[in-house]
Image: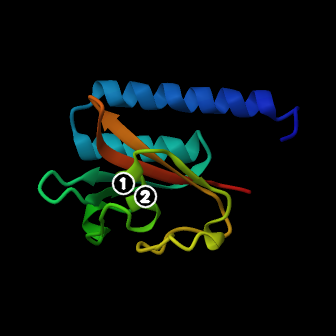
């Protein structure tokens, strides 16, 4: 990374995290809050393809709940079981996953057909009270 860009990038990342924390603390509308968070990640954090999947309490699968740029009505039902694809790895292991280039990852399923296989992917668990409740994922907008 170019040293001249590092302070600006760090400022943008801190600003993004601050905005996300503000959104999470002020809205009780789950779907609206998710859409705002994903929009902020794209605009301020330069992270595209934001998606949040939530653990289904009955099946234990992750179900896709929000994708930046898609309305809830446009979203096809998509589920991931533990160990299934990259997202299922998070459900199974509970750890963040970073992939340098999606095209090189055989476990990447691309069920939504939204991700550029030339870009990296970052996916992280969302835990509440020490229990995995959801997963978020996104890609930097450039390599």
Task: Please give left or right for residue 129 compared with residue 135 in the image.
Answer: left
Q: Can the viewer see residue 84?
A: yes
Q: Quadrant of the C terminus?
A: bottom right
- Which one is in front, 11 or 109? 109
Q: Spot the residue most to the left.
A: 58
Q: Quadrant of the N terminus?
A: top right
Q: Secondary structure at mark 2?
A: helix
According to the image, label 1 marks what residue?
Answer: 92
- Residue at (43, 67) in percent of width and height: 85
Q: How many marks?
A: 2
Q: Where is residue 117, by image quadrant?
A: bottom right
- Residue at (43, 58) in percent of width and height: 89
Q: Do labels 2 and 1 touch, CB within 8 Å?
A: yes
Counting other residues with Cα less than 10 Å from the Cα at mark 2, is it few (<14), some (14-19), or many (20 or more)?
some
- Residue at (25, 66) in percent of width and height: 73
Q: Can the viewer see residue 117?
A: no
According to the image, label 2 marks what residue?
Answer: 89
Task: Please give left or right for residue 77 compared with residue 68 in the image.
Answer: left
- Compared with 45, 106 (above or below) is below
Separation of residues labelled 2 and 1 (CA atoms) = 5 Å
Counting other residues with Cα less than 10 Å from the Cα at mark 1, is it few (<14), some (14-19), or many (20 or more)?
few
Q: Secondary structure at mark 1?
A: helix
Q: Which mark is residue 23?
A: none
In percent of width and height, residue 116 lies at: 60, 69
In percent of width and height, residue 99 lies at: 61, 57
Q: Where is residue 142, by image quadrant?
A: bottom right
In percent of width and height, residue 103 lies at: 63, 73
Task: Please give left or right for residue 107 compared with residue 128 in the image.
Answer: right
């Amino acid at each position: 990374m170019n040293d001249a860009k590092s302070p600006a990038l760090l400022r943008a990342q801190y600003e993004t995290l601050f905005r996300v924390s503000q959104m999470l603390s002020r809205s009780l509308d789950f779907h609206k809050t998710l859409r705002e968070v994903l929009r902020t990640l794209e605009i301020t954090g330069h992270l595209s393809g934001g998606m949040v999947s939530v653990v289904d309490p009955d099946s234990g699968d992750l179900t896709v709940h929000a994708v930046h740029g898609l309305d809830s009505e446009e979203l096809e039902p998509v589920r991931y079981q533990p160990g299934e694809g990259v997202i299922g790895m998070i459900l199974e292991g509970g750890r963040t996953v970073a992939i340098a280039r999606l095209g090189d990852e055989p476990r990447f399923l691309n069920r939504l057909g939204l991700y550029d296989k030339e870009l990296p992917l970052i996916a992280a668990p969302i835990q509440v009270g020490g229990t995995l409740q959801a997963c978020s994922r996104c890609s930097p907008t450039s390599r």
